[in-house]
Image (spheres, rainbow, N blue to C red):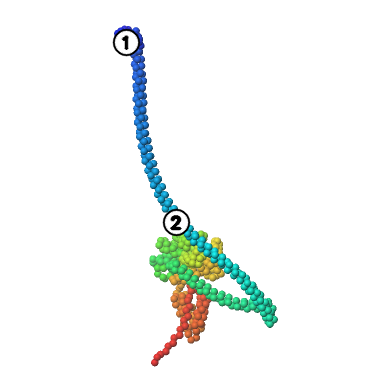
Amino acid sequence: MVVARTRTRTPSYGSRLNPRRLLAYRKCEVMGPMQLAQVSTGMVAIWILLGLILGGGMVYAALTMQAKAKKDSADQAAARVLQDAESRAADIARKAELETKATFLKRQEEFEKQTAVTRNEIREAEKRLDKREDQLERKMDALNIKEKNIERGEIQVREKQAQIDKKYQQADEYLTQQKNELLKVTGLSPDDAKKQLFSKLEQELEHECAEIIAKRVNEAQDEAESRSRDVVITAIQRYAAGHTSASTVSTVDIPSDEMKGRIIGREGRNIRAFEKASGVDIIVDDTPGVILITCFDPVKREVARQALSKLIHDGRIHPTRIEEVVEEVRGNVEKEIVEHGKKAALEANVQGLPKKLIELLGRMNYRTSYGQNVLRHSIEVAYLCQVMADELGLNGTLARRCGLLHDIGKAIDHEVEGGHPAIGEELCRKLGERDEVLNAVAGHHGDVPATSPYTPLVAAADAISAARPGSRRESLERYIKRLEELEHIATSMKGVKQAHAIQAGREVRVIVDPEDIDDANAMRIAREIAKRIEAEMTYPGEIKVTCLREVRAVEYAK
């Protein structure tokens, strides 16, 4: 292995070398190549380290100088901002001081003005107080004078009172002497005299009280009649309902007379099956295109009418089909009954009715009275009762309930014996209705005495509803018979020449003989005719009796 030796440059003696560098040269001369390379590498690392240190120092120095420069500039900027702020603050302070001075001066002027006004008011108040003091002093002087006069007057009054007492004493003595003399003359004791005097006074007072009572009673009757007329007229005007009359016999139209034979069936088996299933009577006569259904129960009659109409429309008529249709229609009608009852309670605004009463109300939709639908009549009576109760200051809700339920007995009067008022009362009692409702149901036709103010209201509303024109329908024979009875009652009275029933039997006009009957007797005859009509006839509403007495003087000039 050849080891190359490095040539080293021997420094001249004239150059100045650092002892450390000279030592390094010498060492290099005696080192081998590997050692020389290691020394070179270490030197490079040392130089790099020295460069890094120098560079970091220089960077640090630069950063320090830069930071110092920024700090100086920031201090300068802060100083400038502080200076500007101080100058602005000084300006603001000067402005605030000027504004404060101006405000102070302004307020000072206002305070001085208010002070001047207040001083003027105080001066005026002092003047008024001075005047009042002067007036009070004058009044005090006047009061002192009056007190002195009153004292003098009291002395005089005491003197006069003593004189009056003395005179009263003398009068009492004189009256005592007179009483004694009167007792001696009459021979009566003081008790007997008092009894006679009181007896006479009682008779006089009884007569005066009777006159006063009669006068008050007449005034109360006139006022009650006028007031009741106003209440009834108001109720009628506020409720104006339409009326439709219904018959107790239902009719069913048929397309042809051939259908009558199909309804009757072979040997009448179809009609017998229908009557047995529905509980009604079928009348098939010679009337073309119509079959009559009669039954006392209106619900059964309605079931039969709908069932027969459905059978005619279907065309299949045999006993099995008849029973199926009747049962189906009966279920539908029962649902309709409940719906009618609910609608009636809602329309009359009566709440809290039991389910049984609602069902009975619905049954009343198929019940008629003189051709008038009983359910519509009950709703109308409920409304009229509420109107009249409001006019009289009573409970309108309770009045509506009494009016709606007053004819509830008619829903089952064909099933239970007795009149519908008694039936309805017993039914409502079982269902827990109030005493006012029970008395109104039982007494609206006068069957029992009225124990509450709602019973006469229901009776009046019932009469109003029944007396409406067109509300009820009568047969022609019954109508003519009623007119004849009215005329017969009128003509049976002595002194009556003619009698005519007019306005569909609502009025009877009686013509009397003016020579035999005077004015007083004419009033008597009208009253007697009205009493006989009330006692002998049954009619809805009221009948007016008018008695006419006319004297005609006729003379001819010749």
The residue located at (52%, 62%) in the rendering is 136
Find residue 186 and report its image quarter: bottom right
Side of 82 where 341 appears, left or right? right
Left or right of 1 on screen, residue 470: right
**Which residue is pictured at 37% across the width and 31% down the height?**
75
Position of residue 544 in the picture relative to residue 49 (left or right): right
Asked whether 441 or 104 is in front, the reply is 104
From the viewer's side, name the closer residue of 272 and 526: 526
For the C terminus, the quadrant is: bottom left
**Against 51, is 469 above or below?**
below
Residue named by callout 2: 120
Going by the numbered disc 1, the residue's amino acid type is: Arg
Mark pair 2, 1: CA separation: 117 Å
Tell me what residue is drawn at x 53 percent, y 75 percent. Answer: 218
Residue drawn 59% across the image and 70% down it:
153
Query: Where residue 474 sits: x, y (%)?
Result: 46, 72
Q: Secondary structure at mark 1?
A: loop
Element under label 2? helix
Residue where numbered disc 1 is placed: 16
Judge whether residue 393 can be spotted in this image: yes
Callout 2 amino acid:
Asn
The answer to whether residue 331 of the structure is visible from this angle is: no
